[in-house]
Structures are given as structure tokens and as C-alpha cells.
Amino acid sequence: MTTAGLDGDTGAQPQRTMLSWHRTVLSVTLGTLVVSITAQRLEHPLIAAIAALTAFALLVLVLRSLRQWGPHARARWTVLQMTCISVVVLGSLGLLLALVNLFS
Amino acid sequence: MCEGETREALGVEPAEYDDEDDRVEAGSGEGTGAADEAERETRRPQSVYGVGTEPDVRFSLANERTALAWLRTGLTLVAGGVALTTLASFGDGHAVLDVIAALACLAGGVLALAAISGWRRRERALRLGDPLPAPRILPVLVGAVAVFALLMAGYAVYQVLM
């Protein structure tokens, strides 16, 4: 009978999880850049700047934290929190863009 | 399906960390019981890691991937909202598109918060050996997508008729 845990799993689970992290970080970064470009096109330079800075800060912070990632590492919660905050910030910027576009 | 049933379905038995050797073999890297206790007290979030026992790491990793998938779903809603804002800017009088875009972005942000809340609830259940909680946000998401689709269909019909 197989024993559950990483010993019986030969690394596939951490790899899949890491790939999932990569997809998420890539998606958030690209999403932020899309918001930035859209804001720039709609002539809202402040929103564009905030979005671009968010993308940059996110990349630096998350990639630094992911270096410490491991199946038993403590950094996972921090990175998860930062990624969640990034999506919320992105959603807020998108909401702001839609409202500014609506009332201008 | 609860954790025990999941393990039975997988045909595996939980890893037992009864002695120090097992811990070292499993790669947890922890040392003594005092160190475990110190880690339990400092590891965040306390509402999750302050209770229960360390579950099979595969279940924790699967929980993490589920939370990430929810985050990406939220992000997709935000991206859809931004795309609609761009679309609305191409012509005049597309206030409906802007309203739908705003709602989509709002839903995306809420979904991201729900993702992290769901992760906490599931990890806590895993640690306590409780049955996994049902995803609370799933029915809301299904409803929101249905409303979103209806609004878009209504808008398309309106555009054709006008």
C-alpha cells in the first residue's frame, strides 16, 4: 500500500503547485498591464501609472517570496495573501475605469 | 467528500509522524516538540495553523491549487470587465457596457477574497479532520455568470432592434 505524503508522490504535487503559482502570477501581471494600457488609451494616466506600478511591485514581491516556497515553507500564506490583494486592486482599478468611462 | 473518504478513494493511508525519524524522512525539517509548538504559535494565519494537526501535505497543496484556480477565475472576470470598458469606449452611449464592466470587475475582486477565505476554511477542516466544507461562492458565481450572460444577450438584442 502506498503511503500518502511527498515520499509516496515523488515530487509531482509540488511541481504542479509551483506551475499553478507561475500561471497565476503571469495572469495577474498580464492583467495589470492590460488595465494599465487600457487606462492609458482612455487618457487616465493616473490609473495607468498605479496599475503599472502595481504590476512591477507584484512581480518583485511575489517572485522574491516564491524563492522561499516549498511544500512545508511558511511563505505560502504571505504569497497567497499578496496575490489576492493584487487581484482585488486590479478589480478596483477596473471598476474605477468603468465608472470614470461611464460618467465622463 | 471528507478527507478520510478521499484518502480511502485514493487507496492510501495517511502519513504518520509519530517519531522524529518519520519527520526527517518526510522532509518537514522540524526538530523537537518544542520547535513544533513554537512554529504552531508563530505560523500565520493563526486561525488555521493554531488548530489541529499537520495534514497530508498533498491535500494542503491541492487546497492551495484550488485557491489559485479561484483567483484566476476572479482575474478572468476583471479582465472581461476591462475588455468591455475598452469596447464601450469605441462608440457613444454604451453606458450599459460600462455598468456590466463595473459589475464584472467588482465580482472579480469579491471572488479573489472568497478564494482566500475558502482556502482558510478548507485548510482548517483538513487540520481538524472535519469533512471539507462546500464551496459557498460556487452558486453565487454560477448565478453571476448567468446574469452576466443574460445582460449581454439583452444588450445584443437591444442593439439589433434599435
Image (spheres, coloured by chain):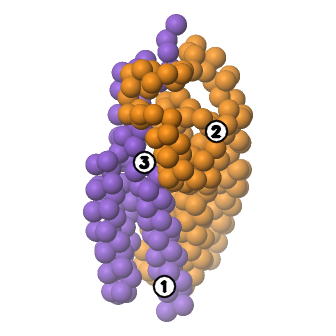
Q: Given the image, on which type of amino acid does mark 3 rest?
A: Arg
Q: Colour of chain B?
A: orange
Q: Which of disc 3 and disc 1 is earlier in sequence?
A: 3
Tag in front: 1 or 3: 3
Report the residue marked by disc 1. Answer: A101
Asked if residue A45 is positioned above or below residue B72 in the image, the reply reads below
In the displayed structure image, the side of residue B100 where residue B27 appears, left or right: left
In the displayed structure image, the side of residue B157 where residue A13 appears, left or right: left
The secondary element bearing badge 3 is classed as loop
Please name the residue shown 60% across and 35% down the image: B53
Q: Distance from label 2 to label 3 (Cα)? A: 17 Å
Report the residue marked by disc 2. Answer: B52
Please name the residue shown 32% across and 62% down the image: A61
| Mark 3 chain | A
Measured from the top left, where is residue B30 in percent x and y?
42, 35
Q: Given the image, on which type of amino acid does mark 2 rest?
A: Gly
Residue closer to the observer: A96 or B25: B25
| Residues at marks 2 and 3 on the same chain | no
Please name the residue shown 71% across and 35% down the image: B130
Report the residue marked by disc 3. Answer: A74
Q: Distance from label 1 to label 3 (Cα)? A: 42 Å
Measured from the top left, where is residue B71 in percent x and y?
50, 54
Badge 2, how many Cα within 10 Å: few under 14, some, many 20+? some
Q: Given the image, on which type of amino acid does mark 1 rest?
A: Asn
Asked if residue A33 is positioned above or below residue B1 in the image, the reply reads below
Rendered image quadrant of residue A59: bottom left
